[in-house]
Amino acid sequence: MNQTTSKDFRILAVALSFGGFGFVVMEGQKTIIEFGRRVADGDKNAQSIAKMKKLLNFYRPDVLVLQDVEAKGSRRYPRIKTLNRQMKGVAEKHKIGVKLISGKQLRSLLLGNPKGTKQEMAEKLAKDFPDELASRLPPKRKTWESEDGRMDIFDAVALAVVFRLKGAKRTI
């Protein structure tokens, strides 16, 4: 299922993190084609770009959805902001549309609460996609613990789902 037909709109959502990125490929209203996490070390930006290019070439999405790291209230490292711009540029060179969604939009549209947590979003997505995501839901982290790497996948799914929700609201 590598080619996109005129009736199938394919989304690649990528959620950047310190150690790489999570991704999801969705088609139709709620069909997850593939999801996962790509780890990068060494030159993390170069490795992440190379891994994203492979996803673009294999899945041929119609749109790349990224978090808006420049949005008001976003507290992302400068390296992540640079990587986000680089990924946007690569997608544009491949003639793939790019959509940016802020963290506040994610929480507002997915949870109905702009102050909701990533854990709440992940739990909702695990319920919405039980076959794909329920077994991967990380436990709630303690204050002193680092974020579980699997959370990148849930962040990517949230981006794709909210992109769909925003599209549905425009057509109503």
Image (cartoon, helix red, strand yellow):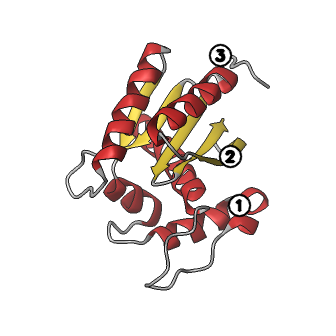
Local secondary structure at mark 1: helix
Q: In the picture, which quadrant includes the N terminus?
A: top right
Visible residue check, residue 81: yes
Per the model, the C-alpha gap separating discs 1 and 3 is 28 Å
Residue pointed to by mark 2: 35
Kind of residue indicated by mark 2 = Phe
Q: Can you tell which quarter of the image residue 101 is in? A: top left
* Residue most extreme to the left: 72
Q: In the picture, which quadrant includes the C terminus?
A: top left
Mark 3: few, some, or many residues within 10 Å (few <14, many ≥20)? few
Q: Can you tell which quarter of the image residue 61 is in? A: top right
Visible residue check, residue 68: no
- Residue at the image point whose x is 49% and y is 48% from the top: 15
> Of the residues under marks 2 and 3, which one precedes in the sequence?
3
| 69 to 130, vertically: above or below | above
Per the model, the C-alpha gap separating discs 1 and 2 is 9 Å
- Residue at the image point whose x is 20% and y is 53% from the top: 72
Residue contact between numbered discs 1 and 2, judged by CB atoms under 8 Å: yes
> Of the residues under marks 1 and 2, which one precedes in the sequence?
2
| Left or right for 93, reference 5 | left
- Residue at the image point whose x is 36% and y is 69% from the top: 113
Mark 2: few, some, or many residues within 10 Å (few <14, many ≥20)? many
| 25 to 124, vertically: above or below | above
| Left or right for 72, reference 91 | left
Residue pointed to by mark 3: 6
- Residue at the image point whose x is 45% and y is 66% from the top: 111
Counting from the top left corner in percent of width and height, residue 108 is at 37, 61
Q: Which of 31 and 73 is in front in this view?
A: 73
Q: Nearer the viewer, mark 1 or mark 3?
A: 1
Residue pointed to by mark 1: 133
Per the model, the C-alpha gap separating discs 2 and 3 is 23 Å
Local secondary structure at mark 3: loop
